[in-house]
Image (tube, rainbow, N blue to C red):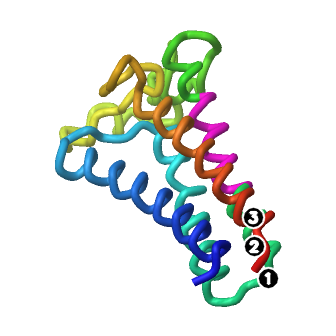
Amino acid sequence: MTKRDTLVTLALLGSAALLAGAWGFQHFGGLEPCKMCIWQRWPHGAAVILGVLVLAGAPRLFISLGAMAALTTAAIGLYHTGVEKGWWEGPTSCSGTGNGLSGLSGADLLSTEIAKPLVMCDQVVWDFLGLSMASWNALIALALVAIWLAAFRSRG
C-alpha cells in the first residue's frame, strides 16, 4: 500500500468513524439529530465513497473532492457551533423563534399521532470538554482535510 493509499484510507475511515459515532449517539444514546446535524453527515458519506473510489483507482482529482467534502462538513459544523453559541442566527425551522410548525395544516396541528419531537439546532444536547458534537465534528473534519491534502500532495 502506498503512502497516498494509507492517507486516503485514514481519511475515509475518519469520516466513517464520525458517521458511526453520530448514528451511535442517535440509535443507542437516544440523541435525535437536528436538521444541521443531518447536513453534517452527508459530506462524510461523500468522503467515504470518494475514498473508496480513489483506492479502486479513480483519478487523483477525487482526492481533492474528498478534501472538499471534509471541508464542507467542517464549515457546516462551524456554522452550527456559531448557532449553538448564539453568535449568529440559524435556520428558522430549527432554531431561535422558529418552531418548525410553518406549513402545517390545522389537521396536522390537531393530530393525535405521536411525532418525533423537533430537535432545535441552537440547543446543545451533548458536549465533551465544553465542545458540542458540532464543534467536535468541525475540528476533526479539519484534521481530515489536512489528511486529504497530504494524500493529494503525496507521490503515488
How far is the residue under mark 2 from the one under mark 1? 6 Å
- Position of the N terminus, as image quadrant, is bottom right
Q: CA separation, marks 2 and 3?
A: 5 Å
Label 3: how many Cα within 10 Å (few below 14, some 14–19, many 20+): some
The answer to whether marks 2 and 3 mark residues whose Cβ atoms lie closer than 8 Å is: yes
What is the quadrant of the C terminus in the image?
bottom right
- Which residue sits at x=26%, y=38%? 31
Q: Nearer the viewer, residue 16 or 109?
A: 16
Give left or right: position of 150 versus 111. right
Residue 105 lies, in percent from the top left, at 44, 37
Amino acid on which the number 2 mark rests in the picture: Phe
Q: Amino acid at mark 1?
A: Pro
* Magenta stretch, residue numbers: 68-79
Q: Are marks 1 and 3 in contact (CB under 8 Å)?
A: no
Asked whether 80 or 90 is in front, the reply is: 80
Residue named by callout 2: 62
Say what amino acid the circle numbered 3 marks.
Leu
| Front one among 3 and 92 | 3
Residue beneath label 3, please?
A: 65
The disc placed on residue 59 is: 1
Secondary structure, mark 1, is loop
